[in-house]
Image: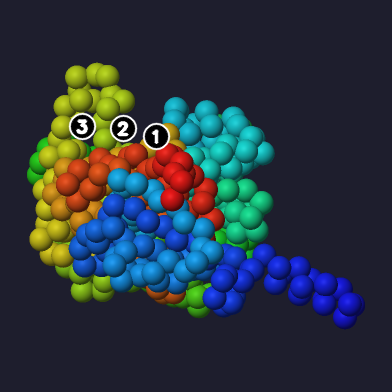
Amino acid sequence: MKRIIGVLFILSMAPMGFAQTGSPKPATMQAIRCARLLDVRSGAIVENPVVLIEADKIARVGSAKEIKIPAGATIMDLGNVTLLPGLFDTHVHLFLHPGPQDTQTLRESIARRTIMAVKNAEADLMAGFTSERDLGTEGAEAADVDVRNAINAGEIPGPRLQVSTQAISVEGGHEDYFGYNPAVRMIPNAQMVEGIDELKKAIRFQIKEGADFVKIYVTGPEQVRSLTDVYVVPQFTLDEMKAAVAEAARLGKKVAVHAGGGLGAEVSAEAGVYSIEHGYYLDEPTLLLMKQKGIFLVPTFTVTEWNIGQSTTPAGQARGRLVEQLRHQHFEKALALGLKIAMGSDVGPFPHGTQAEEFSWMVKYGMTPLASIQAGTINAAELMGWSDRLGSIEEGKLADLVAVPGNPLQDINALKQVEFVMKGGKVVKNNAPPNDR
Ligand SMILES: [Zn+2]
């Protein structure tokens, strides 16, 4: 055994080599050069940056004037691009694809859907999304846990994932209104519960299955009639939400809620969930509670706009315009209050790998390009509890990096053209033209 270790030691030393100076150089050192780097914390653009990467972490960051690239380092010159931290999408559905939801959640096997989820994970990664939160498999049980674990084990490519398994709803509520004969519904689209005991049991079950957080559909259908007449069906009471947050916390987990608005959103904020998803029609009391408690809003504009774009009838299009107007009003209030906002697209109902569209929608709905990029980097890392290791290009953080053409602060659409992706120091995509350094 000792002999084998000796041989391995020599082998592992060999590629390190020695430069003319005689100092050992780690073989894993990589250097990235390009035209610009965005410091997402300050909003500053660093011209001609150099990022040194050792193994899976960022060793040094600065301008080419400040940083000398060590001899023996592998140099990647990406050319006229802007380097950014790996992007986050904090609201995805890897187990969904475009098209009627009932046909996929009821008629496609979990095995088939898992194969698709694996492909979706790769598509998202190639689009620059190196970290994602999956907000429910919609009938594919806890298959997201296996996708997450396979990515972590390096078996398949994909973003770093936090998953929620089935999510929780109520009889006849969200994810339970397809109207099928219950006899043919072998697997519901979420775990349906009634009352605090069942709610707590579902939370225990899902965390046992491997959920990183708990997702609850706290509201059901949204009845939008006019700018002043919106009713969002609440599905859980304040006592139930308090019990859910406490039960998740007992197991070291947090609760994210699907909430259109109204009372459901308000009791969620009161109970102390950590994120409100969608939040199309959040009332003033809810917004104030969110501000006070530091609850994140994940706006998911892209899925709304996708759905509006799908409607072909004049009535559907009129409703779409009304929804857009209402969204503008409510989002403006959220921005004015300075709520914490994390980028989340709800990708799945629209094609995976296209969700950088969300950045453009956030800007169209009133955010600055920098604020939208922060929502998809540092803010999202904070939401996912990964601020210490991800979300910005800083020394000691994991080397998750993307590069886009031009300057995304001048044209946010640049984020739809990710040319280079590195995850944990490994290049997973590089469209930059080859160079001789
Ligand atoms: Zn969703």
Q: Is mark 1 within 8 Å of ligand 1?
A: no
- Label 3 Cα crowd, 10 Å radius (few <14 / some 14-19 / many 20+): many
Q: Nearer the viewer, residue 283 or 310?
A: 310
First-in-chain label (1 vs 2): 2
Rendered image: mark on residue 307: 2
Amino acid beneath label 1: Phe
Q: Give the Cα separation between the discs numbered 1 and 2.
A: 9 Å
Marks counted in the figure total 3
Whole-angstrom CA distance, mark 3 to mark 1, is 17 Å
Q: How is the image coloured?
A: rainbow
The local secondary structure at tag 1 comes to: loop
- Disc 3 on helix, strand or loop? helix
Of the two numbered discs 3 and 1 in the rendering, the one whose residue sits closer to the viewer: 1
Identified at 16% across, 43% down, the residue is: 364
Decide: marks 2, 3 in contact (CB < 8 A)? yes
Task: Identify the residue at image location x=53%, y=43%.
Answer: 122
Q: Disc 3 designates what residue?
A: 320
Seen in the picture, residue 133 relative to 231 is either above or below; the reply is below
Q: Quadrant of residue 39?
A: bottom left
Which of the two discs, 2 and 3, labels the residue nearer the N terminus? 2
Q: Amino acid at mark 2?
A: Asn
Is 300 on the left or on the right of 167, as rendered?
left
Residue 304 visible from this viewpoint: yes
Labels 1 & 2 near each other (Cβ < 8 A): no
C-alpha distance separating marks 2 and 3: 8 Å
Residue with the most extreme top position? 313
| Residue 420 position (above or below residue 106) | below
- Which is more foreground, mark 1 or mark 2? 1
Query: Pointer 1: what residue?
Result: 350
Task: State whether label 2 is within 8 Å of ligand 1.
Answer: no
- Residue 200 placed where, x, y %? 52, 67
Q: Residues within 10 Å of mark 2 (few under 14, many from 20)?
A: few
